[in-house]
Image (spheres, helix red, strand yellow):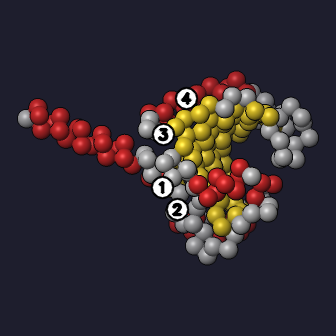
Amino acid sequence: MTRLLLILCLILSFQTLARTDDISEFEIEGISINDSALNYFSIEQINDNMSMPPNLEKSAYTQSCFNNYGKIYDRICLAFNKNSFEKKIVQIQAQIRYDKDVINICKKKQTEIDEELSLIFKNLKRKDWGRRLLTGWGDTNIESYYYPITYEFADNSKAQLGCYSIMNKSILKVAVYTSEFAEVISD
């Protein structure tokens, strides 16, 4: 009986590990990469909440952002191809926004999430980038910076979390995105 229980536990453990190697198996607020945004929002909601960050302006992608969606985060943004009828999600970004620059509080929450992700993504390559200047976002404050941590999947898709100090506020961002989308935002 003990052996049977041990074998069952090992099988379930390996299945869980295998799932975390596929980015589409990871969820943020119940949403996964490759889902259709139409499974969660109407086309009117998607169109009414379009948001074009500077790094997507010249790309084939756009995003819609929704405030007060889910239980954990203040805001969630879904990116997809501009010409896609199905609105297949290539990036999910969730945010916790702080009303003032409280980078230490943000970094504490980032550490908690990173510890959870380290358990989930223990087979993935993790990189802590340290403090980096935030450029190209039209922020007039030259002191804007962030602390990114990335996890890289076998297909070059990524999970990223980071605390941002921008325009005298702090923002914690947690994102997952496909390898194709990673190429666009890294340019």
Q: Amino acid at mark 3?
A: Leu
Q: Amino acid at mark 1?
A: Ser
Circle nearer the N terminus (2, 3): 2
Q: Amino acid at mark 2?
A: Asn
- Could you tell me which residue is drawn at 75 percent across and 58 percent down? 56
Q: Amino acid at mark 4?
A: Glu
The answer for how far apart the CA atoms under marks 4 and 2 are is 27 Å
Tell me the element at label 1.
helix
Residues marked 4 and 3 touching at CB (< 8 Å): no
Whether residue 186 is visible? yes
Circle nearer the N terminus (1, 2): 1
Q: Which mark, by number, is residue 34?
A: 2
Residues marked 2 and 3 touching at CB (< 8 Å): no
Circle nearer the N terminus (4, 2): 2
Q: Which mark, by number, is residue 155?
A: none
84 lies above or below 181? below
- For disc 1, the neighbor class at 10 Å (few under 14, some 14 to 19, many from 20) is some
Where is mark 1, residue-wise? 24
Q: Which mark, by number, is residue 112?
A: 4
Which is nearer the eye, 54 or 151?
151
6 lies above or below 74? above
The picture places residue 27, in percent across and down from the top left corner, at: 49, 50
Q: Nearer the viewer, mark 4 or mark 1?
A: 1
Q: Nearer the viewer, mark 4 or mark 2?
A: 2
Circle nearer the N terminus (3, 1): 1
Q: Which mark, by number, is residue 124?
A: 3
Residues marked 1 and 2 touching at CB (< 8 Å): yes
- Could you tell me which residue is drawn at 77 percent across and 54 percent down? 55
Circle nearer the N terminus (4, 1): 1
The answer for how far apart the CA atoms under marks 3 and 1 are is 15 Å
